[in-house]
Image: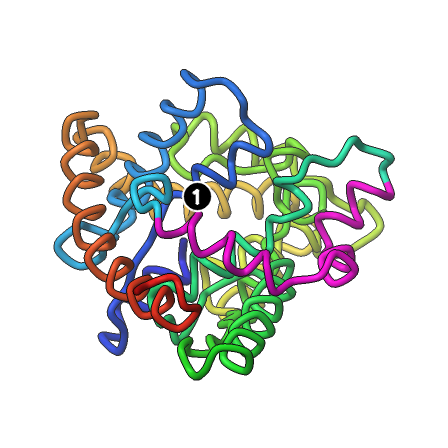
Amino acid sequence: MKQFVDLLNTGEYECSVFVADYHALNFIQNGDELRGLIVDLVKDYVAIGLGPQKVTIFKQSDVPEHTELTWIFDTITTMPYLMRAHAYKDSEAKDKEISVGTFNYPMLMAADILLYDTDVVPVGQDQKQHIEYTRDTAEKFNRVFGETFTLPNELILKNVAIVPGTDGRKMSKSYGNTIPLFGTKDDIAKAVMSIVTDSKAESPENVYAIHALLRDRNELGELYKANKGKYKVLKESLIEDIEALVAPMRAKRDSISDADIKRVLKDGAEKARERASKKMAEVRKKIGVSL
């Protein structure tokens, strides 16, 4: 989310943000739960500053060109190629039953990106392979059917390439090691106080790693030097810095209604569909189905 806001604030890009609800079906197969998560996510986007006046926000499922283009990409993609994808290999290593959706995930993601002639995709380090797959797919389509798609580049900001969790691993809800972005101050304090620290170290590395996302490292260096070994003091400082960031966004989020979100998504879908339909008209002509 920080990358989205930072990119928007440069004024260099026209930004689009979408809810990957069809991707989510690989993990969430409960209609009421998915509906609630969609609304919650869009509220998060708007609350952090990605307002509909500045950004096109839409649901993947509202633009059927995403799934149409995915099928076209499927026809030029081999199974051995997809078997190298991280999501597939991870599921296979854990001996999970693998759905076609999980196997085909990279092609839907390629369609998500290429439909809009995207130049830059802000991602975490773990998503880099998906951008490589997207570029490969665009290159193959262009080679087979003629120049059609822009080749996108990933944008990985070094300080948020991998956000550390409270246990030192990558921050992830599935690990239960997150600090709630819109939590109350008590929620934040509880999470920060649970950060794993090394009692042998003079400076708690996991606390510092999260703190460095919020403050200048030179300034932090002085703070941590002055409070060497005082883990409680340093955690309390981190709590205050997180609360200073979160409190205004939390208040804004609380003011957003579900009806507001429905309007945002409706308007965003209309804008996205206009662009996507133009691209698909070009694609259909190139592959020969448009007479």
The residue sitting at 59% across, 31% down in the picture is: 27
Left or right position of 194 against 116: right
Magenta includes 230?
no
Q: Residue at coordinates 50% horizontally, 47% vertically from top-left? A: 238
Camera-side residue of 105 and 28: 105
> What is the x, y in percent for residue 201?
79, 54
Q: Is residue 104 visible?
A: yes
Kindly indicate the quadrant of the structure image that contains residue 133.
bottom right
The magenta segment is 65-93
**How is colour applied across the structure in the image?**
rainbow
Left or right, 3 with reference to 101: left
Q: Residue placed at 19% from the left, 32% from the top?
A: 262
Please name whichever residue, 259 or 284, is drawn nearer the observer in this view of the structure: 284
In the displayed structure, does residue 11 sit left or right of residue 4? left
Amino acid type indicated by mark 1: Ala
Q: Answer above or below: position of 44 versus 268.
A: above
Note whether 75 is above or below 260 in the view shown. Answer: below
Residue of label 1: 20
Dividing the picture into quadrants, the one containing residue 80 is bottom right
Residue 222 appears anywhere in the view: no
Q: Residue 177's x, y, as percent?
A: 64, 36
Where is the C terminus found, in terms of image quarters?
Answer: bottom left
Label 1, secondary structure: give it.
Answer: loop
Q: Confirm whether the magenta stretch covers residue 79.
A: yes
Identify the residue at image location x=42%, y=45%.
Answer: 242
Residue 243 lies in quadrant = top left
For disc 1, the neighbor class at 10 Å (few under 14, some 14 to 19, many from 20) is some
Which residue is nearer to you in this view: 165 or 223? Answer: 165
Residue 104 screen position, x and y as percent = 63, 48
Which secondary structure dominates the residues rendered in magenta? helix
